Image (spheres, helix red, strand yellow):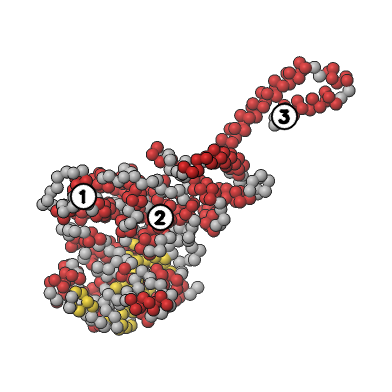
Amino acid sequence: MSAAALRWIRCRRLSTAGPPSVKKVLQWKDLSKLLDKSAVLGCLFITYEVIALDKAVTIDTSAILQEKNKSYIYLRATPSDEKDNLTGARRELHKAARRFVEISSRLLLQSLDEHFSHVDADPHEVALWVLLKKTQSANKAIRLEAVQELADNHHWHDYQYQTAAQVIDHRTAVGLARMPQVDLRFFRHPPDSYHLNDGLRQLLASLPQTEVDKCVRYFTSLALRESTQSLAAQRGGLWSFGGNGLPYAQSLTSVPSEKVESFCLQALVQHSKVRSHCDHIVANGGLQLLQRVYQLRTDSMKIQRNIVRIIGNLALNEGAHQAIAQSGWVSVLAEMMQCPHIMQASHAARALANLDRETVKEKYPDGVYILHPQTRSNQPIKADVLFIHGILGAAFKTWRQKDRNALEEEEAAKREDDYTECWPKSWLAADCPNLRVLSVEYDSHLSDWMAQCPAENQRKSLAYRSQELLKKLKLAGVGERPVVWVAHSMGGLLVKKMLLDALQDPDMHGLLQNTKGIMFYSVPHYGTFMAEYSVNVRYLLFPSIEVRELCKDSPALRSLNDNFLNLAKEKDFKVLSFAETLPTNIGPMIKILVVPTQSANLGIGELIEVDVDHLNICKPERKDSFLYKRSLQFILDALQSYIAH
């Protein structure tokens, strides 16, 4: 109410309550002038209030930057039986909007340390807005505390979750996504899926072929050829029966589009490792296209993993973080993090860790997976345990629990003993919560395609892989804390080669100084008899270059082992070796002792023989089995002085 209006009311009181002489003094002409002045002042006051309100209210509209996504935010179809309530719903919506403007205009103007007891609003609403404002603070500690409080409070109303989803920036969204069991209503959902057409093929064809090796160029052309033939079949075009389309010619009405998409995605994985290609993928709508493929292929966990793998690679570039969040990927990753399948959750954890620049300083390149901690935690990390699989292994399947038969499944069910896809993630992380557990995967997926890359052999040598992995591990911060290495089969040779290469690189000396222990599972330090068997058996287990490097008593292996023994003695590495005693089934009627005890014996440290075959030497039967308990004890002993306090 303006001051002029107050004066006018005061004058009316004087004119009615005073003696007759006062009535004669205040003429109608004077009142008319006074009213004119009050009207002008009232207009000025209203204008000032509107401007102040405009400055006070700031609504994040980042979700609707693109014209095609204007219907993105919480629009839901109304069933026919609810149309009668539409008018009432609109009225409630307008009321909520007015309430939103009123409360936010009051709260967002206040400083963080002011109390809001004088605000006429539900304390629950006040608390939400205070926390949302704190997430924008210039003080990092305040931001982190606010995100933690938002995630810990599970009593917000549904409309409050939706309001928060519109207000929070990508930094806050990533922080919430990395909270354990966060409520998924905090995140904007991605747009609905549309028909894919040949978008993947067009995106792949538009990428430059520079800065990628021969294998990437080879398989990019293969993926384009497959997708072109698939598209031709869908449109009723001609087929080239001399090419790879021949297997599909038997059923032109059933083109395996999932396989074509898989080819394109695996090629995109390689392109996403190149910084300039990442910018190109983002600029040409690749994030939205991948989102649509992800939503369409809910039945294929492999395709979804490859897509999230690409997102994790793109997230290595901080300039792409805003675009990744705006295209709806944070909500997808948050949901995938809560998936019971360890492989799915770990791919999402890697992508979110690369997006989280508030609490994570390391970056996780392609093939380096963080098994623990996968969420934000107040537990300080004291040391690292790094798992390296062998040839034909993988970052997860190599370290799974030993496979069970039907009888063992029944017995385990009685004990309520759940099977784990990855014991370092399920068991070691629980027993050693202050360790960071990483698993590394070689860049071996290209060799799984239908044809073999002409340049693939050079990628499989120990020297090539050692240099490649050292660069990745440095980016992931391996070597900044005490480290224990855990390796299976050829992975142990790779660990020895990496440590010897680190000796020659001044930037990697920290890795040597911080290496406290190495655990070898059936590592062929002196080669394997495998190379002496027939060519068919040899190629069944190892590609040709690995066979040459693993030949029994080969000069290369002898030199590698001698040099490593000198290094291990100089640095006083703790060493534990396990050796298999049972032959391994590698085909019908063929059993081979892949790594004999004499080859698994490094010559230093303790050697333990276990009655298992080569594939199961690194797969404990149960958490209380000797194999796991002895492995855990070695890790604890090697890191005792670092994790005890």
Relative height, residue 473 to residue 251 (above, below) = below
Figure disc tally? 3
Secondary structure category for the residue under label 3: helix
- From the viewer's perspective, is 435 left or right of 457? right
Q: Earlier in the sequence, mark 3 or mark 1?
A: 3
Q: What residue is drawn where x is 41% and y is 48%?
A: 190
The residue drawn where x is 44% and y is 58% is: 360
Return the residue at label 2: 333
In-front residue for pair 552/256: 256
Q: Which mark is residue 3?
A: 3
> Dot 1, crowdedness within 10 Å: few (<14), some or many (≥20)?
few
- As drawn, the label of residue 253 is 1
Q: Earlier in the sequence, mark 3 or mark 2?
A: 3
Contact (Cβ within 8 Å) of mark 3 with mark 1: no
| Mark 2: few/some/many CA within 10 Å (<14, 14-19, 20+) | many
Lower sequence index among marks 2 and 1 = 1
Q: Is residue 232 visible?
A: yes
Mark 3 touches mark 2? (CB < 8 Å)? no
Query: Which x, y percent locates residue 392?
Result: 24, 68
